[in-house]
Structures are given as structure tokens and as C-alpha cells.
Amino acid sequence: MNEPHIRRQAIPILYTRGSHYEVGFDMGRTFGSMIRNLQTQCQILNHSLLPLYNTPKGKKIYDETLASVKASFPQYILELQGVADGAEVEFEHLFLRQMDAILPQNMLCPAAKASCGCSSIILNQKHCRVMGHTEDALIETMNQYYFVVAHIINDQPQGKYKVKEERFMSLCYAGLLPGYTFSENHHGLVFTINTICAKNLRSGRTPRTFITRALLASCNMDDVLRVVIDEGVGAADACSINLAFLNDPRKMCYNMEFAPCPQGKNKSKVCLKEIPVGTYNYHFNKFEGLSLDETDDILLQSSEARKEAMKSYKPPVSGSDVRNMLGDVSGDPFNMYTLLHGFYKYLTQKDEYCVVILGLDNAGKTTYLEAAKTKFTKNYKGLNPAKITTTVGLNIGTIDVHGVRLNFWDLGGQQELQSLWDKYYQESHGVIYVIDSNDRERMDESKVIFDKMIKNELLSGVPLLILANKQDLPDVMGVREIKPVFQQAGALIGRRDCLTIPVSALTGEGVDEGIKWLVEAIKRHSLVRPPREND
């Protein structure tokens, strides 16, 4: 087993004291290698956030969100700048990771799917108060985390809440601010976080990682509510917080959900649930108190599966009960320990390849990807085709078939986004080109961008699957009519493996045939373009 694949048995701890910038710099300098590694490996950053950031609309969303955070929490911007300087990475990349799905969803681009999610249980009894939590994340974060124990002192009050001193301990994913996992401070506040993927996110507001960072300065529940409500600005995205104050005479525990206010008000929408002595509560990665739309189907399915697993247990009465419940592995593929489950699958996956899905906008690329995931992924429930919108930027998907993992990059087909396509060619092992067989008026336009794509030397010899999509509609162009048009570029296609087939992404017709052919073609070409390295 390669060293990067060995699960760490100990988590490094940094003890640091100083201003916000100095503490951030210490984090960056101490864990710089870890931060740089994660930045390099992070698919969401490199294949979604950065390409979108490099568009005029993406830059505008970034700038207005950064300006909002600077106005509310300039000290945490300094802290993040310190991390960037200490680790010698670009500040913009770190801030994009704090924004997460805010950027793609405000550009009407499906955000990359999260991990299968964290699970939290609060047991509040007279004889014991237990807060149990499984920390689950994307596989790239394996071993890329650390504890920070910080004492921050400032000469002048900082930010909208006039904070001068902070003392806390927090588990941090490399490059993310403290506060977005599980944490405690010197006022007795203890809390854990469960990500929630709300549908309607707002740019120019406060990203959840900055709200949870601000929680670390809270002295009491009034402070917590003030931070989460964020009057005058409001949350940009959503999450759930499980918390308690150890010095609370009522011994009350809480679960809070917050999200952007759907009415457009400049404050967060919040649901607060009390968990009094003699009760317990569990929370996963979906809204339980707020009635708001969510987007990540996998995360929702996982949350429901974990919730059902909890119902099979008797109510917990001890810490060992909580540990047993959080160690449940009955809900395959959605176990409580989904990071370990995903790590096992990651290690046993022999070959991993990347495939770009190209074509004009509205050709059906995302619908085809959803059909492929539904065909080849157990228990996957695809997006409702009626809810699929035109991709603006990037949509990411993964399937396992015949011992091979295919990572799909579904790229937006609008004219202004076609200039981003070649950024993905060098890492691609296969190309799927989708044609709208029902759109005769744009066939020439599709042929022009097809020729431009196939001429690119970075795709030389790469297997090509051409899909004549929407064959379920009446009076569409058939393969016999389409194939000669695109094979006029025969000299450019060359001797590479190439297949043109009829499909219907809506009904699933032809999806199996195309994917299985592409896998075999990619394998044949693997000596020239080897599988992607997973370290």
C-alpha cells in the first residue's frame, strides 16, 4: 500500500497564539505541505470552482461575496490571508473553497456532489451528556486535517461583534477555517457541524464556514443566535449545528439549522430545537426543522438511510450506545462510517479514468450523465429530467463499471463556455460528444465545434463516442443521416476508436452499450494514456 493511502493513526496538533493573521500564518506555515497537496488533489476546486471563477459572472459572484465577508469579519479574512501566505498558496483558491457551492449554484450550474455525510447524536441525561459525531468528507481529505489550539488576542475589537480575544480548539481540514467540523472554546461551547445542500444559495452573503468560525468567539446562546441569524447580511448557504454549553445550569443541548432566507431578507432563516435533559436527538445532512428545497440527491438518500438505521436501535442511554449507533455499517452503501467505506472502495478500485462530455447546450449531456449513473450505480436515484437545467460551467459524476472507475466532466455547451473545454483535454481518457438529433437548425454549429475539438492535439488518439441523442422523439435525424456529417472529419478522427450510436438519455436506450464500449476502448488505449494516479 502506498504511503498516501495509509490512514493516519494520529492527528497533528498546532498550539499557537497571536493576532488573527499570525495564527493563520502559523497554520499555513506548519501545515503548508498538507494544504498544497489538498489544493492540488481537490477536483471541486480545480474542475468546477476555478473554471467558473475565471468567467466574468463567476468573478462578480466571488467579489461581492468577498466584499460582504470583509465588511462583517475582516479579522477572519486576515486569518485566511495568513494561511495563504504561510502555505504559499493563492488566497483566491482558499476563499473559493470556503464558498463551496455558492459559486456554481448562483451560476445555475449543478454543484459537485458531497460525500455521503456526517452523523451526529446528542444524548442528554442526568448521569451523562454525550455529543457523538462521525466526521465524513471527500476522499481527497484523507490524512489532510489537523487540530488547532489557538489563543487570539487583539489590541482593538474586531469585526461586527467587536471581539478582542478568542480561545478555542478545532479540527480543521487543510486550508479551511477552524469551526467547520467539531470544536470547543474556553466559554464551554462545544459544537459539531452537519453540511446541508440547500437549493437556493445567495452570493454576497456570509458563507457558512465564516459563520461557524465566528461561533468560536461565542460566550452564550445569545451570542450563538446573533452569529447564526447574521442580521443585516444573512447566510449564503446552509448547515446544521449540534451544540451545548458545558456551564449551562439548565444543561440544555441544541440543534440549529440555518439557511439563506428565501424571502430575500438580509438575515439567515433559522430553526432552533431544544434537547432537554432526559432526551436525545440525531441529525444528518438534511433539513429536519426547516422546510426548504435541497439539491444533493446522494446526500439526501444517505441521510435517510442513516436515519432508518438509527430507528433500528433502542434509545441510547450511555456513551457506549452512542458509539455503537455511530459505528453502524448496516446501511451499505450509506454507512455511518462512509469515509472508511469510500476509502475501501477507493483502494480496491484498480483503474480510474476521466471522460469529458461535450456538445452544444441543450443537447442532453447532463440527462445522459444522470442516465448513466442510474444504470451503473446501485440505489442511485437520478435527477428528475424536468429539473435538469442547462449546465453553466461543470457537472461532475462518477460510475464504476467492469472494474473501472469513470470520472465524468460534463461541460457547459454555451458559446462563451466552449473556451474552457480545452482545459480538461490533457487529463481526459475519453470523449463523449452529444448531438441533439432533433435540432436540425444547429447541426452545422455542432459540426463546427466538433471539428475544433477533434483538431486539438491534446486529444490525439483519445477514444470518441458520438451520441445521436433524443431518439425517443418523432421525426428526428437517425444515425444514418448524422454519421456522414460528422465523419467528414475522418482525417481528424484518424485511427482512434470511434463509435456513433443512437441513444435516448431520457429513456436510457443505448446508454449501456455506449458506456461499455467506451470502457473497453479506454482500456485498449491505456498504454498511451495510463489510468489516473490516485495518490
Image (cartoon, helix red, strand yellow):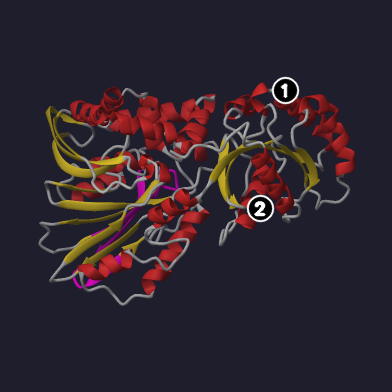
Query: Disc 2 vs disc 1: Cβ atoms closer than 8 Å?
Result: no
**Residue 328 sits above or below residue 192 on the image:** below
Q: As rendered, which of 256 and 313 lies closer to the eye? A: 313
Q: Residue 127, can we see it? A: yes
On screen, residue 148 versus residue 228, left or right, reads left
* Membership of 335 in magenta stretch: no
Q: Is residue 270 magenta?
A: yes
Label 2 is placed on what type of residue? Ala
Q: Which residue is mark 2?
A: 371
Report the number of discs: 2
Image point 33% across, 64% down: which residue?
327
Kindly identify the residue that appears in the image at 46 percent across and 64 percent down.
332
Specify few, some or many for label 2: CA neighbours under 10 Å numbering under 14, 14-19, or 20 or more: many
Task: Give the vertical position of 189 relative to 15 (above or below).
Answer: below
- Looking at the image, can residue 266 be seen? no
Amino acid tagged 1:
Lys
Q: Is residue 277 left or right of residue 272?
A: left
Q: Which residue ends up furthest to the bottom in the rendered image?
A: 314
Along the line of sight, the residue nearer the viewer: 273 or 186 = 186
Q: Tell me the SS state at disc 1.
A: helix
Percent from the top left, x then y, of residue 127?
13, 71
Residue stretch rendered in magenta on the structure: 254-281
Dominant SS in magenta: strand
* Residue 455: mark in rendering: 1
